[in-house]
Amino acid sequence: MSRKERAWLHDEARCGGAASGGIRNLDHSIPEFSRGGAAEEQLWSHRNLGKAFYENPTTHAEAVEEFKKALDLAPDSAPERVNYGLALLRAGKTKEGIEELEKAQKQDPKIPHTWFSLGIAFKKEPDYDRAIQEFEQMVLLVPGEAVSYYNLGYLYKAGRKTGSRPEGFRNLRQTRSEPCWPALPAL
């Protein structure tokens, strides 16, 4: 892959373009790699190949392999573990993906991706109580994140938590800032 192609992938990931897909790209998040060199080049290559494979529905297994190689290069990196966990989930390896995201969450509980992604994974299981715990923590970390409030409202209703159910939807109504959102009914 040429330097120009890598730069394009980097810009797409950093700016939330088509290549990002929720995958983390923190080139200088790992101190031993922030100085440059062959190890950083390998990490960068595995991470970006993983992102490219992650976006293609036919290459999710390859994304898992590339993110695993990146994690092997930086085993103490929570962002690399998050990428690997997300790739496992997308490849249909839910149990393994949940395990990796929980490990990343223990390494760095301030990464919102872990709380949100685990909430979605548990919602799909369905394990609504665990999903609610994850989304409740997510909204503590990122208070204005409307999608998390929506999921909480849905989960409160689905989980029959009647005492808390309206809270998720009320908070969603308060975070609505986009004029293209439909009007939400009063609760």
Image (tube, rainbow, N blue to C red):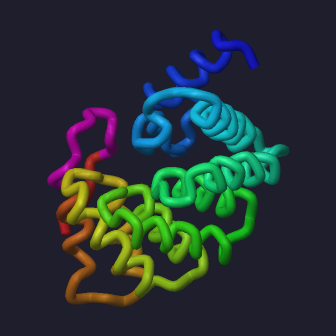
**Closer to us: 107 or 166:** 107
Residue 55 visible to an observer of this rendering: no
Question: Quadrant of the image for the N terminus?
Answer: top right
Q: Looking at the image, which residue is at 44% across and 33% down?
A: 34
Chief secondary structure of the magenta portion:
loop
Residue extending farthest to the top is 4
Q: Quadrant of residue 37?
A: top right
Q: Pick out the residue farthest to the left.
A: 174
Please give the count of numbered marks on the rendered protein. 0
Q: Is residue 123 left or right of residue 93?
A: left
Q: Is residue 160 above or below residue 59?
A: below
Drawn side of residue 4 relative to residue 141, left or right? right
Residue at 24% across, 55% down = 142
Give me the residue at 21% from left, 65% from top.
Answer: 140
- Residue 179 in magenta? yes
Q: Is residue 59 above or below residue 86?
A: above
Which corner quadrant of the image does residue 81 belong to?
A: bottom right
Does residue 105 belong to the magenta stretch? no
Residue 41 in picture, x, y percent from top left:
63, 29
Q: Which residues are magenta?
A: 174-182
Residue appearing at x 71%, y 35% in the figure:
49
Which of these two is toward me, 60 or 158?
A: 60
Q: Position of residue 48 (x, y in %)?
A: 64, 33
What is the x, y in percent for residue 149? 30, 62
Against 178, residue 115 (above or below) is below
Percent across and percent down for residue 104 are 47, 65
For this view, does 4 lie left or right of residue 130? right
**In the image, is residue 89 above or below residue 21?**
below
On the question of residue 155 being in view, the answer is: yes
Quadrant (top left, top right, bottom left, bottom right) of the C terminus: bottom left
